[in-house]
Amino acid sequence: METTRRTDPQRQLRLKLRQRVEWGRWGFLAIIFISFINQILLLCGAKFHFLFSAAMPYYLNWLANQLDLVGFKVIATLLTFVLYGAYAACWLLSGRKREWMMATLALYGVDTLMLIVFALSLLENPASCLLEVLVHVAGLVLLLFAFQAFEQLRKMPRRRRPAPVRAPEE
């Protein structure tokens, strides 16, 4: 017995949009993971870091190490934990609610702006962060596509299952 599978164009579009959302979420999870690796590298004294990451936790702790102020180190550490908590919450909840995907996009957008501010104000050669800024923009584009896919999914009519057939009452 041969079965044929119906290819519903709306179903295909839904799958494509859900896949875009998931690509954005997995991309953000990679950003969180690489950011954490960068923190470990910084603690170990490495002179490099990976670019596809969040800049705020890294540069906050880098600056704390450069200034060598105990109070600022404590504040930087606490802010880092808060940022990682916010990143994790955004990642976990962005699978269900578009508002959390928007928060993810906004959080990473602020991170990108802070990277630019950091490069322009604290570095002798701000152009040294150009590649890192471009990588951040690529991450923002990925998250923007995921958010737009979420919006399109929200605007699509919901699929309705056929109502069960009831036996006529006598």
Image (cartoon, rainbow, N blue to C red):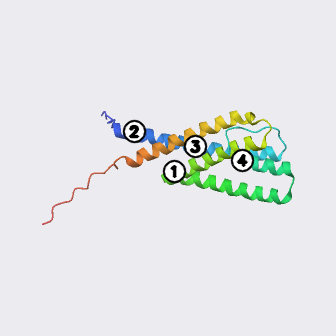
Residue lying at 82% horizontally and 47% vertically, measured from the top left: 43
Tell me the crowding category of disc 2: few under 14, some 14 to 19, or many 20 or more residues within 10 angstroms, Cα based. some
Please name the residue that numbered disc 3 is placed on.
Answer: 26
Contact check, label 4 and label 3, Cβ < 8 Å: no
> What is the x, y in percent for residue 159?
33, 48
> What is the x, y in percent for residue 60?
76, 50
For numbered disc 3, what is the local secondary structure?
Answer: helix
Please name the residue that numbered disc 4 is placed on.
Answer: 36
Disc on the earlier residue, 1 or 2: 2
Give the CA distance from mark 3 to mark 1. 10 Å
Q: Specify the quadrant of the image occupied by residue 46.
A: top right
Residue lying at 87% horizontally and 53% vertically, measured from the top left: 68
> Is residue 96 at all visible to an observer of this figure?
no
Please name the residue that numbered disc 2 is placed on.
Answer: 13
| Amino acid type, callout 2 | Leu
- Horizontal placement of 162 versus 16: left or right? left
Residue furthest front as drawn: 121
Disc on the earlier residue, 4 or 2: 2
- Horizontal placement of 52 versus 69: left or right? left
Please name the residue that numbered disc 1 is placed on.
Answer: 95
Give the CA distance from mark 2 to mark 3. 20 Å
| Amino acid type, callout 1 | Gly
Disc on the earlier residue, 3 or 1: 3
For numbered disc 2, what is the local secondary structure?
Answer: helix
Give the CA distance from mark 4 to mark 2. 35 Å
Residue furthest bottom as drawn: 170
| Amino acid type, callout 4 | Phe
| Amino acid type, callout 3 | Trp
Disc on the earlier residue, 4 or 3: 3
> Is residue 118 at all visible to an observer of this figure?
yes
